[in-house]
Image: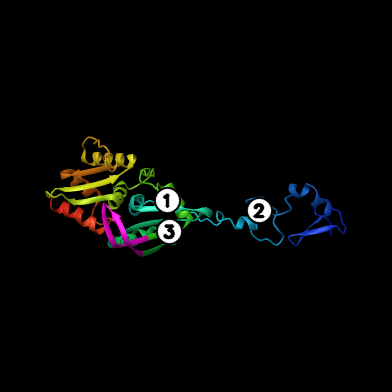
Amino acid sequence: MKCLICGWEGKNQRSISGHVVYCHSILANDYKDKFDLFKKCERCGKRLSENCKGKYCKGCIGDSEINKKECFIPMSPTFSYFLGLAQTDGSMTKSSRHRGKFQLELSYRDRHILKGVSKIIPCNYTICDRTRKIIKLNGRVYRNKKFSLLRVCDWGFRDFLEQCGVPYGKKSDIIKPPHLTNLFIPDYIRGLYDGDGSVGFTAQGLPFLSFCTKSELIKEFILQYVSDITGKPLRKINRQKRDNVYNIMIANQDSLTLGNALYYEGCVAISRKYKKARDILNNS
């Protein structure tokens, strides 16, 4: 058979991919790059074997970045609420070889909300329960307290959450409102309140909604939203000296306006806080 490039016919020929034939001199010089005779790895450029049917070499196939699946969740009230809850009660960790997990931990009595928000997660997840023998919460010591966990280990999902404003590691000081188009702001703020907020009545029977945060940007975002819906000037508050946190306290008529905007009928929320918010509105 003749060489398909130079036309030479002889014994020093070689078959590529089983049916294309080239002479030895063509294979030995730079023509092999010019005519792209050999199949190469699309990632590192290494020459692939004749029997290789894929696009990557063995070394690249072992890299998890090639097997990474992109994740995207369309914007919705449920996803906006999930972002707020993830920034307060969620956590993300990572280690070598792109391993890691996202975890959302709530009290066992709030387990229903984990099942509600898990419907928008497009990858594998687990919901489990665990009991801590001794734990300190808000200055109190609890024994044998039960919690529920939503855990997602998918790398693409974690990267998507990070792009949406949920950072890795300690986040109380650095969280900030997501800069996303079509973000449902009332649902996002409701997620923040369900995580680190309180809803109810004071000892004097006055309605209130309060929220604690260390983040300067989250504090400004909530105060600006309260100013927008109430029509009142923007408030200025300082950090508490004891805990170095901002305690945003909304009471009286402003709490009714805020509660009606956040905890509207049929919204996704922790049931006990939703009931308190509706009691505030019904008793006004």
Dot in front, 2 or 3: 3
Going by the numbered disc 2, the residue's amino acid type is Cys
Q: How is the image coloured?
A: rainbow
Q: Nearer the viewer, residue 275 or 153?
A: 153
Q: Residue at x 33, y 60 (%)?
A: 116
Report the residue marked by disc 2: 41
Q: Earlier in the sequence, mark 1 or mark 2?
A: 2
The residue under label 1 is: 161
Identify the element where label 3 is drawn: strand
- Marks 2 and 3, how far apart in space? 32 Å
| Residue 243 drawn at (x, y percent) | 28, 43
Of helix, strand and loop, which one carries label 1?
helix
SS at mark 2?
Answer: loop
Which residue is the site of mark 3? 152
Based on the picture, tell me whether residue 142 belongs to the magenta stretch. Answer: yes
Amino acid under disc 1: Leu
